[in-house]
Amino acid sequence: MLSPELLCRLRFTLRDLPRLRAEVEACAASAGLGEPRRGEFVVAVDAVATNAVEHAGGGGQLVLRNLGNELECQVADSGPGFTEDVIPELLPGLDGATSGRGLWLAKLVTDRLSVADSAAGKGSVVTFAVRLPEG
């Protein structure tokens, strides 16, 4: 396996989300991720980053890497923390709720997603990835 290539590292708050989406899309395109997967990946990034802004301290840090066969994104925050079991298996909101879809959607459109405690002991790190086309 090739060593991971760092594509971008960004700290973000609410006002940075449009720039974050544009940067991730450009990096994903340069890594060879085509449509519609690139659009789905950007949606997943936006959903996880928006969760960090809304529920985990107002911002976070995004790290995007090309692992050779996958495009991997990590979003770290300094919020209260959570575990993967908060991500519903079925579409949330069928009961009329208008929120709670971000992590579910990110898990749905990516090839892998995991949640871990941050290294600092406060907050969470959401890691997700999509496979890159061969060649």
Image (tube, helix red, strand yellow):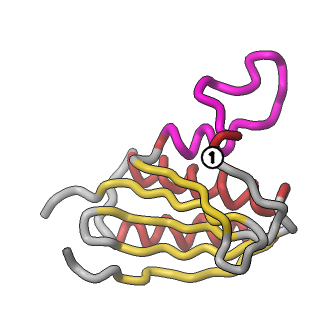
Disc 1 crowd rating (10 Å Cα; few below 14, some 14-19, many 20+) is few
Q: Residue at x 44, y 80 (%)?
A: 7
Q: Is residue 95 magenta?
A: yes
Q: Is residue 95 above or below residue 76?
A: above
As drawn, the residue found furthest toward the left would be: 135
In the displayed structure, does residue 77 sit left or right of residue 108?
A: right
| Quadrant (top left/top right/bottom left/bottom right) for the C terminus | bottom left
For residue 86, above or below residue 91: below
Q: Position of residue 94 (x, y in %)?
A: 74, 17
Residue 101 percent location from the top left of the image: 70, 37
Query: Could you tell me the amino acid type at mark 1?
Result: Glu
**In the image, what residue occupies the spot 32% across and 62% down?**
70
Which residue is rendered at x = 48% and y = 53% of the image?
Answer: 41
Magenta: main secondary structure: loop
The x and y percentages for residue 59 are: 79, 70
Residue 30's image quarter? bottom left
The kind of secondary structure element at disc 1 is helix
The residue lying furthest to the top in this view is 95
Magenta span of residues:
87-108
Along the viewing direction, whichever of 7 and 22 lies nearer the viewer? 7
As for residue 21 lying within the magenta part, the answer is no
* Quadrant of the frame with the N terminus: bottom left
Looking at the image, is 26 positioned above or below residue 116?
A: below
Q: Where's residue 65, x and y in %?
A: 42, 75
Q: How many marks?
A: 1
Front in this rendered view, residue 133 or 119: 119
Residue drawn where x is 66% and y is 65% of the image? 117
Question: Does 70 sit left or right of 97 as displayed?
Answer: left
* 51 horizontally vs 76: left or right: right
Residue that carries the numbered disc 1 in the rendered image? 84
